[in-house]
Image: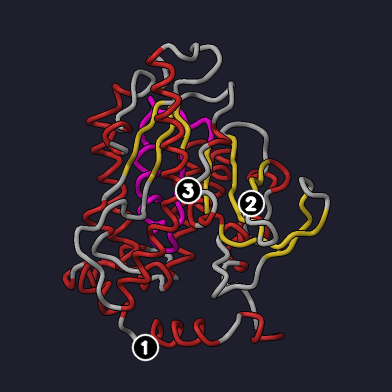
Amino acid sequence: MAKKRINLALQGGGAHGAFTWGALDRLLKDDEVEICGISGTSAGALNGAALKAGMVQGGKAGARDNLSWLWGQVAGVTDMRLAHWMAPFGIGALSQAIEYSWPVALSDAVSNQMSPYAYGPFYRNPLADIVERFDYDKVCNHVAPLLFICATRVRNGKIKIFEGDEIGPDALMASACLPTIFKAVELFDPETGRDEAFWDGGYTGNPALFPLFQKDLPDDIVIININPLERDELPVTPKQIQNRINEISFNSSLFRELRAIEFVQRLLDDGAVSEGHMSRVRVHMIADDALMAQLSVGTKLVPNAAVIKTLRDAGYDAADQFLTNHKADLGQRSSVDLPQMFG
């Protein structure tokens, strides 16, 4: 049976990236699905690197094991079954409790009044302990799936895509560098020929789709979306307003690229551009906006084992539903109605 060849576009969103873990776990269990390229930002970058290293080491089973290891490190537990005891409280109640907890309140107060540069010798990026343990001989391996990591140059605000041997611990930390919490990550950029400082890639590409427009990669892009595209309720509290501002900001780059894809599709449909000159990109999305709308910035920044377990299971179920409803569309047509999205 012919493989369903896809690219993955993995959004960032802190600990909410556990949803992506679950979705990837389900996709990796399907023998008909072949992952050829991955573009990831922030938590999506970590997920992509873990998947790539595990795939090179031990195929799809190795990728699943490596993703499980990664999120065990993030959650601070070695067995996610330990998170079940908090399940009766419900994801919404847990999110609210975390959002108004004293660690989150203290973090908000400190980040609003103090620069991460003020910590001096006491500063350390907590992601370093995790990303420094990745096997970069495998992460940077040139076999499929190809991996692209997105960050933002502080100096000029332009997007930076790390690939191949450029990907290392600093590149992953740059992709996940929220500037109010972490110091900018500084490293040499071959594109500009100078040392550059980098912030979170979500400002310029969450995730970037254009690295996946290569002739040797398939035309199907499956976006695993963890920032709600829509929220029906008007945000009224300071936390709600700031959270929605962040969501809109981190979705805006994705919307711009999807709008560009929709424009090219119309040109192809109208015959204004021949098929050979531009690719007919097929767009798919795995998401659970109803679940994500119950969460907040607090559950992004404070890894809670119960929330991570719930998100992982939700991502698995969302990917399972996607495969049931749309696996036949892969290689044939988009399952996302872009004209309706931008109508």
The quarter in which the N terminus is drawn is top left
Q: Tell me which residue sits at (43%, 16%) in the image.
A: 268
Percent of width and height locating residue 215: 58, 21
Q: Tell me which residue sits at (28%, 58%) in the image.
A: 292
Q: Which residue is mark 1?
A: 102
Q: Tell me which residue sits at (54%, 74%) in the image.
A: 180
Percent of width and height locating residue 288: 26, 50
Residue 169 appears in the figure: no
SS at mark 2 in the image: loop
Please say if 258 is above or below 228. Answer: above
- Asked if the residue at tag 2 contacts the one at tag 3, i.e. Cβ–Cβ closer than 8 Å, the answer is no
Where does the magenta region start and end?
Answer: 9-37
**3 or 1: mark nearer the eye:** 3
Q: Label 3 amino acid?
A: Ser
Classify mark 2: residues with Cα within 10 Å, few (<14), some (14-19) or many (20+): some
The quarter in which the C terminus is drawn is top left
Q: Label 1 amino acid?
A: Trp
Please say if 255 is above or below 296. Answer: above
Q: Which residue is mark 2?
A: 158
Query: Where, by quadrant of the figure, is residue 125 drawn?
Result: bottom right
Q: Which residue is mark 3?
A: 253
Query: Where, by quadrant of the figure, is residue 30 drawn?
Result: top left
